[in-house]
Image (tube, grey):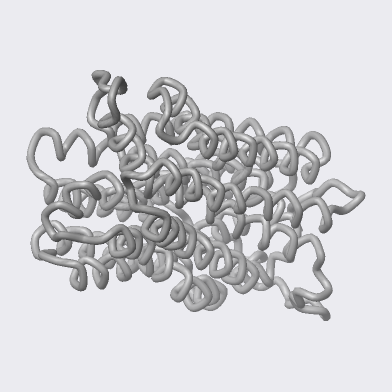
Amino acid sequence: MPRQSASLITALLTFVLVANLVPLMTVPTVLPDLQARWHLTAGQAGWIGSIYFAGYAIAAPILASLSDRIDGRWVLAGSSLAGAAASIAFGICADGFWLAFALRFVSGAAMAGVHMPGLKMLADRTLGPAQLRSAGIYTSSYALGNAGSALIAGVVQSLLDWRAPFVVGGIVTLLALPALALLRPAPRQAAKEETPAHPVMLRRNRALVAYIVGFAGNTWEVFAIRVWFVACLAWTLRLPGNDIDLPNLGVVSGLAALAGVPVSIAVAELAVRYRGSTVIVVTALLSVLVCLGLAATAGGNVFVVLALLVLLQVTSFADVGALGAGAVAATHAAERGRAFGIYATVGFASGFAGPAVVGLVLERLGGTESPDAWAGAFLVMGVGSAVTAAAVWFGRSDQRPSGGR
């Protein structure tokens, strides 16, 4: 049977990833409603917003390693079904903090069975420069799913109610199944490749460690701004002199996240063509500057704050494709499931912590109606990209990744 083209494989697996991401931003989009209806504190709201990533982090090493032993298509199919069920159940049954907390945990665990196993499947089916470009596109498409989730949730909520986005998100997730059916098994030689004499040992793989820590910094900032974007903008609009007409704020957040997709793909391409570590460091430092700008202008002019919020959605995500491609290049084919499991676990543990810590900072510094609290929140977000820049800079190699191993 002839090998499927890299472009078709990338398109199918990217669609599977994006379809599974549709429920992701449902909670952040409707968070103000949930806080009002369920009388949630800022800390509780932060936990509901971030527990998804804890579920991901806990399940990632198990499900990513499982894709080393069985056909990854089964891992992705089962995880897609579980994610769809959890999202639909949230929309129908959730009535308070604890049930919402549990269902979002399941949703995150299900996503762990799609994201990195999908990247492994992509890497196993592509070679050379096409492998790195495909990995950059696939990982960058996370923002496409993120943005699509916020857009769909915002539109559906405005037409129906806060529960409907969860049900719709679960239904869209099921569309991943026919796409998986079109994907052929991995080439036999990739499945039988022998484990190298020196398996992945983090202390011996400086490049992989740098990308793992860099991804952790990235997810800290990305998910913190994704979870708190709507709440911050809603507060800013309530301030005197800041009342302007905007679409549903979930739609605004989604459009801002969507702008990050082509930027992330472009940054990943620059990292393939030039020295990837330098590209990532410059991008991360730019995002730190945007966080500092938001901290300085919190509670100020709505046009300035809105522009910086949108810019942070873009800059925080801009290096994710380059980080993913770098991680692919730093691992051997026979080790990818385990290596990507570590990459995802550390990254999404940080993604879980980021929104929760921001929520606690907001609560301790005066709540979501305090400019000082929001200033502190953006300083905490900026720590993520600062860590990314430092990790990649100190873990840099003199050689550009070649991929295809």
For image coordinates 59% across by 51% down, the residue present is 218
Q: Is residue 196 left or right of residue 312?
A: right
Q: Is residue 359 above or below residue 373?
A: below
Image location of residue 155, percent across then percent down? 19, 33
Quarter location, residue 252: top left
Say whether residue 272 is left or right of residue 75: right
Quadrant holding the N terminus? bottom right
Asked whether 351 or 333 is in front, the reply is: 351
Does any portion of residue 219 appear in the rendered image? yes
- Number of numbered discs visible in the structure rendering: 0
Residue 193, placed above or below residue 24: below
> Residue visible at 23% across and 37% down?
154
Q: Looking at the image, which residue is at 23% across and 30% down?
A: 248
Query: Which residue lies at the image location 27% right of the left edge and 67% below the top edge?
Result: 82
Q: In this orientation, does residue 185 appear? A: no
The quarter in which the C terminus is drawn is bottom right
| Quarter residue 217 falls in | bottom right
Picture coordinates of residue 174, whole percent (x, y): 25, 54
Q: Work out which residue is located at the far right of the displayed protein and give it.
A: 398
- Measured as percent of width and height from the top left, residue 38 is found at 14, 60
Classify residue 178 as left or right of residue 398. left
